Image (cartoon, rainbow, N blue to C red):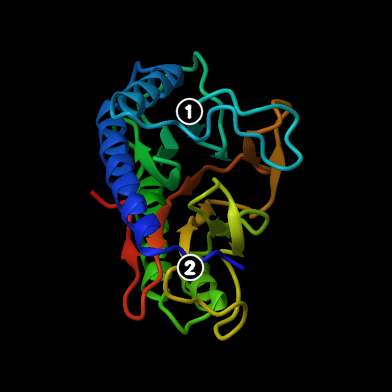
Amino acid sequence: MAKIKNAQEIELLRESGKRLARVLAALRDAVRPGVSTRELDQLAERLIRAGGDEPPFLGYTPHGAPHPFPASLCVSLNDEVVHGIPNERILKDGDIVGLDLGVAHKGMITDSAITVAVGKVSPELQKLIVRTEESLHAGINAARGGAQIGDISAAIEAIGRKEKYGIIQELGGHGVGHAVHEDPYVPNFGKKGTGPVLKPGMVLALEPMFTLGSRHIRLMPDGYTIVTEDGKWAAHFEHTILITEGEAEILTQA
């Protein structure tokens, strides 16, 4: 179960989240046709270090990964769901790009992600982006002390089911704070009234992932990039939140 953060840790997480939100906003503004995914990663690292902080994704090795992650920012294009490795690929008009970023401020880590349209995208893709972000906020609204993990999962799932999107089941949200990934795991599907009870002081990263097709995914040979099995495009959003007695506090909000 998630470690309950104390008052000092929560204040550091609030500051970490504010700093992350500023960097992610700058990255959103930098997304345009002609920009490479590596340039976005370089901008992210430069802005994080300029604030005296560390990029916790750089050199991070999740369980089962073949080698440390080689970048500060995950950049996932089109049919890439999450964990895309930045390289020389160039963004094109009509693409959608997921930007997933962490910031470590005085040892306390927050995590957030957005999906951004590159230039002009189809109405179908714009709707996917909007609905995926809506599902994130539905999950946040369900997260409060005394509720259960399944309440969050069910709220996210309901929007995906309504739109007939593929809901990624192998990946989901997680605890965060002292490490990039902590307990508990927060699926993006489930039943209300099930799972661990949420307690004030828990810090969670919620991250719905929806696709225009099947929910099935596969891992690319680089050992990190997750793509849809059917090649349909995907969207991903994430906020780090603090569980309270009432409404959850969004820590990674500008």
Q: Position of residue 47 (x, y in %)?
A: 31, 26
Vertical placement of residue 207 versus 233, above or below: below
1 and 2 marks in contact (CB < 8 Å): no
Q: Secondary structure at mark 2?
A: helix
- Name the residue beneath numbered marker 2: 156
Q: Residue at x 38, y 50 (%)?
A: 129
- Name the residue beneath numbered marker 1: 72
Choose between 69 and 226: the one closer to the eye: 69
Q: Residue at x 52, y 17 (%)?
A: 87
Choose between 41 and 3: the one closer to the eye: 3
Q: Callout 2, which amino acid?
A: Ile
Q: Which badge, 1 or 2, comes first in the chain's sequence? A: 1
Q: Position of residue 125 (x, y in %)?
A: 40, 46
Q: Is residue 166 left or right of residue 242?
A: right
Q: Residue at x 48, y 82 (%)?
A: 147
Which quarter of the figure has residue 101?
top left
Q: Position of residue 114 (x, y in %)?
A: 38, 44
Q: Callout 1, which amino acid?
A: Ser
